[in-house]
Image (tube, rainbow, N blue to C red):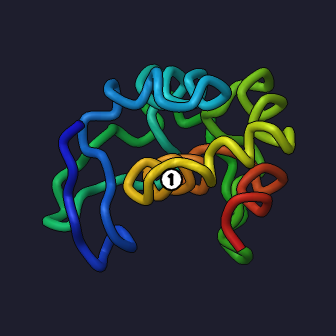
């Protein structure tokens, strides 16, 4: 995996997301959703280089007052997988750069119902 380190990204993140597909089984559909549908917010490295496109189909519904995602690019199946205790534990057991990348993708792509479980 290619890793970028920056305060902008809250530490280390993976910049070639494809390499994460096999890291955490329950998050593989998240990676697929993001690579296919993009994110609802810009996901960049520390230099501002775009890692993945923002939602090309404009399906995202973001509450601009609370800065939460009501409808994101994560599929229902992905969100159902991510909210399980087993998945959450698996994500938090990963090395920091994997964990940070996955939690940021969740925050930038999934509904607030899911993201609040991972990002306080």
The residue that disc 1 covers is 99
**Label 1 neighbourhood size at 10 Å, few (<14), some (14-19), many (20+)?**
many
Out of 22 and 16, give the one closest to the viewer.
22
Image coords of residue 21 (percent x, y):
45, 23
Out of 99 and 94, give the one closest to the viewer.
94
Quarter of the image for the N terminus: give it: top left
Total count of labels? 1
Residue positioned 48% across, 42% down in the render: 39
Quarter of the image for the C terminus: give it: bottom right
In the image, is 22 to the left or to the right of 92? left
Residue positioned 49% across, 28% down in the render: 31
Residue positioned 46% across, 21% down in the render: 22
In the image, is 81 to the left or to the right of 55? right
Image coords of residue 87 (percent x, y):
74, 38
Residue positioned 21% across, 50% down in the render: 3
In the image, is 29 to the left or to the right of 51? right
In the image, is 120 to the left or to the right of 49? right
Q: Secondary structure at mark 1?
A: helix
Image coords of residue 49 (percent x, y):
16, 54
Asked where in the image residue 63 lies, by quadrant, the reply is bottom right
Q: Is residue 29 above or below residue 102?
A: above
């Amino acid at each position: 995996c290619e890793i970028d380190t920056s305060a902008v990204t809250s530490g280390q993140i993976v910049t070639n997301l494809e390499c994460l597909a096999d890291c955490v089984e329950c998050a593989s559909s998240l990676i697929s959703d993001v690579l296919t549908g993009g994110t609802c917010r810009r996901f960049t490295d520390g230099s501002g280089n775009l890692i993945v496109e923002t939602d090309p189909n404009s399906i995202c519904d973001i509450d601009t007052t609370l800065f939460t995602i009501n409808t994101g690019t994560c599929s229902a199946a992905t969100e159902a997988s991510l909210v399980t205790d087993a998945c959450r534990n698996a994500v938090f057991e990963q090395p920091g750069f994997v964990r940070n990348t996955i939690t940021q993708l969740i925050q930038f792509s999934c509904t607030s119902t899911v993201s609040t479980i991972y990002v306080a």
